[in-house]
Amino acid sequence: MRSTLFLAPLLAAITTTTAQHLKLEIPEVDEYVHSMLGEFDHWTHYPGPSPTYWHHPSPRPTKPVPPKPTDQCAYWLADIKHQGIAAFNPSPNTYQVFRNVKDFGAKGDGVTDDTAAINNAISSGGRLGPAQGGSTTVTPAIVYFPSGVYMINASIIDYYYTQLIGNPNCLPTIRAFPTFSGGLGLIDGDQYGANGLGFGATNVFWRQIRNFIIDMTLVPGGSSVTGIHWPTAQATSLQNIVFQMNSNNGTQHQGIFIESGSGGFMNDLVFYGGNNAAVFGNQQFTMRNLTFNNAVTAISQIWDWGWTYKSINVNNCTTGLNMSSGGPTAQSVGSVTFIDSSISNTGVGIATAHGPNSLPPTAGSLILENVVFTNVGIAIEGEGNTVALAGGSFTVAGWGEGHSYTPNGPQVFEGPITPVARPASLLQSGGKYYERSKPQYQQYSVQSFLSARSAGATGDGHTDDTAALQRAIHTARAQGKILFVDQGDYLVSRTISIPAGSRIVGESYSVILSHGDFFNNIYAPQPVVQIGRPGERGSIEMSDMIVSTQGQQRGAVLFEYNLNSPSDSPSGLWDVHARIGGFAGSNLQLAECPTTPDITVTADNLNQQCIAAFMTMHLTKPSSGLYLENVWLWVADHDVEDPQLRQITVYAGRGLLDQSEAGTVWMVGTAVEHHVKYEYQFANTQNVFAGQIQTETSYFQPNPPAPIPFPYVATLSDPVFPNTTVLAAGNVSIPAADGWGLRIVDSSAINVYGAGLYSFFDNYSTTCSNQGNGEVCQDRNFEVVGSHGVTVYCLNTVGTHYMIEVDGVDVAYYGDNLDGFVDTIALFRL
């Protein structure tokens, strides 16, 4: 969801979930914000230090912190020549992309108040801040922190399209003074103003924070203070951050606070101390490799639709995961998938409010797989503090609660389940699913990098950079170097080929932007970025990049993956996204592609200039071994540059198609949205790990219905769509020719660990997903055909009448699986 009109019911879900669907309101979020803040006051309020603070045992800083030796802290990102440009900024020649906080006056000496200097580094250059609201892509920035201790007395205010990056070789510390008194969080990712959150949380895209120590230990333990406030949406990440909090009795510290949004991904975080080390509330998220030590509650889950936790380690806490918010009569947590994790020396491992009579009926759905409990008092606590799973020391192979379809149902269950028969090719040592964090190349010197701009590419959004960018890719690979694609928009008129052995890293999401006739034949599609040739072996790494199209590109395939990569060293894409339309330079904005809900759109009168892509990502038959982490494939539903974020109509045929015959694919925290035919399709493939996946159906459908304007292609296993509408009980008309959220066709060993398949609109109207209207935005959204060995944990749908179809038969009806605004099935297996 991209519009603030949806944030209101999401926030309302925290406190007003009932057994029926939430009423979807249209007014702006502002009227809800202050009551919401009151609800969370005990997490967010900071009255300042106590009068007796200076008797506190924590030392008062009195002298500079000595820097580490330069040779230990050298980091290529600080040393490389900075020549990135914001191609579509009003002043691209003078706008500064890379900012070192010390160039703006920050000292990092452990004594000086660096608040103002850091905020100046973030805000300078006419950038978009929360006080202005809205969104933009024309002011990207990396704000870099060298090693040091940066003292602050008020919040660091994050701006739109900002990457806050510390030195990974010598993590910088952001430390609050004892008198810290300003803002919600040492880093405030979305500052509140008089009218609520500055940025609509479901529209905060393309930002990162990584490589920091967030230190709150000087703030008295009895005072509430937050490390990072992070209401956010897709294409965002937190990585490699340590949170240091007071761990004494009565501590009120918390590491992360998220109350809204449509995320998202975070990984490699460590929490020490705190009352609630992390407080999470958002539509959906994927979180991997989080460690909690000595907190009262490691994770307080205040609300969600779906959440996937992987490699979570809880040590010496009172409660590990508390998902009982709202209590048994008004549960506000929809579902949680918790895998490959451990909880030790903790009173209650997981606290829920789920039980035989809890409401909504499927809220509190929970799946555990491969979870090790060690010296835990109660492993899982149920409704009314009952014991759902006794404590002790043991490993849970599989356990769950909620509704199951195997494939028929629903069956209400609570207890052990048969875990997925995990394909060996997807596993690392110890039986866990393979995982690998985004490389930052901190072990390499600056001499190991080649700049795309230094190699002759311009990135100015106007010059054809095809030859120069291709030459830079080949040169870097031949020299064994890492290609640094300086910030810019690199216009290409032919396919960019990335051979095995390539390593490519962008700067604040550098853009490869296709244009021209080569990509404009809908009957002869061409890849914009081709990763490997068919039959080629080896691996690549790519991070912090975006691939986009400019104007009409009816035959553009944004990513084509052909490499045969080994399962123990797969190719990897981290923070690599597709963005189709809705941004400066796309020629697919409000002026070119307005919505037309009052006109019946057909193949004859459709706006041909807004056919922007044939397919977004294609994993071809000979390919294998691909690791995707935090990848968002987005067809714009609104104009990002428009102050009002008004909706647009852009057509892209297919989302992510996996036809890899050997498979071995990981999709960790991925989302695919607003394509005509489908978002995810697995066809004649196998051995897939996916979770959390998230989709949205195109807002304009069924006007026109799928597959318009894209022809059928049998070799791609395209779906065949029925008549445009069907009649449900009571003669309610439901669109039947909308794009699928998820299709699994003639495939096996497809394992989905959390899925949110959302259909909010019918021709830009949300009436179809309002409470009590029968989930009539779309007839079906998830189809399985001719497949076996399929498992989907914690499936959540919105606006969809029949949640699952198997071989042409509807097997799951929304009304049997009510969970507040969403409908939830904890376990589907075929």
Image (cartoon, rainbow, N blue to C red):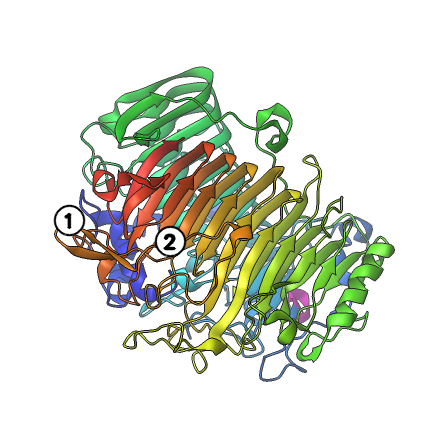
Predominant secondary structure in magenta? Answer: helix
**Mark 2: amino acid:** Tyr
- Work out whether residue 24 or residue 298 is closer to the camera in this orientation and state it: 24
Q: Quadrant of residue 278?
A: top left
Residue 108 lies, in percent from the top left, at: 65, 59
x 49%, y 71%: residue: 611
In what element is the residue under mark 1? loop
Given this view, does label 1 or label 2 mark the residue nearer the observer? 1
Is residue 13 visible to us here? yes
Mark 1 or mark 2, earlier in chain: 2
| C-alpha distance separating marks 1 and 2 | 53 Å
x 32%, y 47%: residue: 797
Residue 205 lies, in percent from the top left, at: 49, 62
Residue at which label 2 appears: 46
Q: Is residue 159 above or below residue 785?
A: below
**Mark 1: amino acid:** Ala
Q: What stretch is highlighted in magenta?
A: 99-103
Q: Which dot marks residue 295?
A: none
Instruction: Give the farthest residue toward the left.
Output: 730
Is residue 252 visible to us here? no
In what element is the residue under mark 2? loop
Residue at which label 1 appears: 729
- Work out whether residue 762 or residue 218 is closer to the camera in this orientation and state it: 762
Relative to 760, 251 lies left or right: right
Relative to 86, 384 lies left or right: left
Position of the N terminus by quadrant: bottom left
Residue 823 lies, in percent from the top left, at: 28, 44
Q: How many residues crowd around disc 2 within 10 Å: few (fewer than 14), some, or many (20 or more)?
A: many
Residue 679 lies, in percent from the top left, at: 46, 53
